[in-house]
C-alpha cells in the first residue's frame, strides 16, 4: 500500500465503542480485545507452568532437607543470578525454531507455546522458595509426624497431607504471577521477539503503534488503548492478589 492509502486507512476514534482503525484499516476495538485474550491466556498458562514447577521443586527440597535441600537451593540461587529476560529470549528463540517445523502446531501457535514455556520456565524460582519455606515448617507438625509413624510413602505425605495446607499461599502467588507474566510477554512482543502476526497481544499492538508514530500524523490511539488496557488489567490483577493474600492469611484474621 502507498503512503496515501495508509494515511487514509487510519481513522481516529469517534465514540466509546469506536477506538478507530490502524494503518491497515483494522478495527482497534476488536484488535485490543483479541490482543487481551491472547495476553491473558499466555499469562495464565505461564503462571500455571511456573506454579507447578515451583511447587514440586519446593516441596521436594523442603521435605528432604539437609544436603539435598542445600544443593537444590544453590541451583535456584545460580538461576537467580542469570539475566532473566535473556533466558526468556534464548529459550523462545531456540525452542521456537523447533516447534515451528511441526505442521500440527504452526508458526503462530508455536511462538505462543514457546513464550508460555519460556516465561513459566524461568518464573518458578520465587514459587519454589516460598513453598520450600512453608514445607520446612509443616514437616515438623504433628500430623506429618503421625503420617510418618504410620509408614506412609513420602509422595503421599507430600501431595496428600502437606500440599493441601499450601493451597492458600499457592493461589495467592499464582494470582500475582499472572500480571508479571503478562508484562514480560508484552515487553518481549514490544521488542519483536514475542508472539508473531497474525496473532496480536497488547505488547505487539503498542509496538505497532509506536512504529507508525511520526511528527506529522500523531496517531495517539494506536498506542493509548492497548497500553491503557494492559495497565488496567495489571492493576486489577494485583489488587485481586493482594485481596486474596489478606483473605487467606491466617495471621491477619487472628
Image (tube, grey):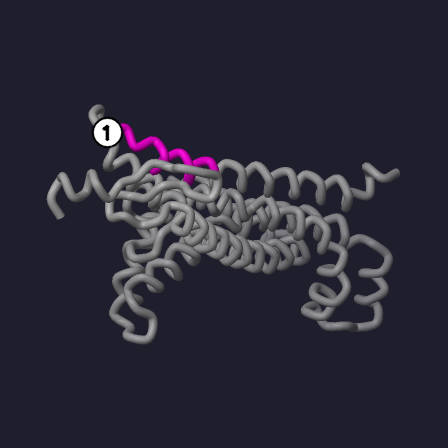
Q: Is residue 190 left or right of residue 168?
A: left
Look at the image and tell me whether residue 86 can be seen: no
Q: Is residue 212 left or right of residue 46?
A: left
Vertical order, 107 against 129 (above or below): below
Q: Is residue 175 left or right of residue 102?
A: right
Most distant residue in the front direction: 14
Most distant residue in the top direction: 215
- The residue lying at 35 percent from left, 39 percent from top is 206
Vertical order, 69 against 153 (above or below): above
- The residue lying at 30 percent from left, 57 percent from top is 198
Mark 1: give few (<14), some (14-19) or many (20+) Cα within 10 Å. few
Q: Secondary structure at mark 1?
A: loop
Vertical order, 69 against 223 (above or below): below
69 in the magenta segment: no
Q: Quadrant of residue 108?
A: bottom left
Magenta extent:
218-228
Q: Nearer the viewer, residue 60 or 32?
A: 32
Q: Nearer the viewer, residue 13 or 243?
A: 13
Report x, y in % for residue 60: 62, 59
For the C terminus, the quadrant is top right
Q: Nearer the viewer, residue 251 or 112?
A: 112
Most distant residue in the left direction: 2
- The residue lying at 30 percent from left, 39 percent from top is 11
Count how many numbered circles sit on residues in the image.
1
Residue annotated with mark 1? 217
Q: Nearer the viewer, residue 239 or 36?
A: 36
Amino acid at each position: 500500500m502507498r503512503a496515501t492509502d495508509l494515511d487514509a486507512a487510519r481513522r481516529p476514534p469517534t465514540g466509546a465503542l469506536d477506538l478507530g482503525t490502524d494503518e491497515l484499516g483494522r478495527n482497534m476495538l476488536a484488535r485490543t480485545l483479541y490482543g487481551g485474550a491472547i495476553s491473558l491466556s499466555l499469562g495464565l498458562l505461564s503462571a500455571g507452568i511456573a506454579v507447578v514447577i515451583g511447587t514440586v521443586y519446593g516441596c521436594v527440597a523442603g521435605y528432604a532437607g539437609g544436603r539435598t535441600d542445600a544443593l537444590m537451593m544453590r541451583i535456584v540461587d545460580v538461576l537467580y543470578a542469570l539475566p532473566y529476560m535473556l533466558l526468556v529470549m534464548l529459550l523462545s528463540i531456540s525452542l521456537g525454531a523447533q516447534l515451528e517445523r511441526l505442521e500440527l502446531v504452526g508458526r503462530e501457535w508455536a511462538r505462543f507455546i514457546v513464550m508460555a514455556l519460556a516465561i513459566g520456565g524461568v518464573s518458578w524460582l520465587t514459587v519454589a522458595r516460598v513453598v520450600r519455606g512453608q514445607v520446612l515448617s509443616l514437616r515438623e507438625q504433628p500430623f506429618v509426624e503421625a503420617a510418618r509413624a504410620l509408614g506412609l510413602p513420602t509422595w503421599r505425605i507430600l501431595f496428600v497431607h502437606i500440599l493441601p495446607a499450601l493451597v492458600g499461599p499457592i493461589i495467592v502467588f499464582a494470582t500475582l504471577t499472572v500480571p508479571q507474566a503478562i508484562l514480560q510477554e508484552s515487553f518481549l512482543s514490544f521488542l519483536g521477539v514475542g508472539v508473531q502476526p497474525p496473532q496480536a497481544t497488547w505488547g505487539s499492538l503498542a509496538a505497532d503503534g509506536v512504529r507508525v508514530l511520526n511528527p506529522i500524523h500523531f496517531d495517539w490511539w494506536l498506542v493509548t488503548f492497548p497500553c491503557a488496557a494492559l495497565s488496567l488489567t495489571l492493576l486489577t490483577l494485583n489488587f485481586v492478589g493482594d485481596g486474596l493474600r489478606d483473605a487467606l492469611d491466617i495471621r491477619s484474621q487472628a
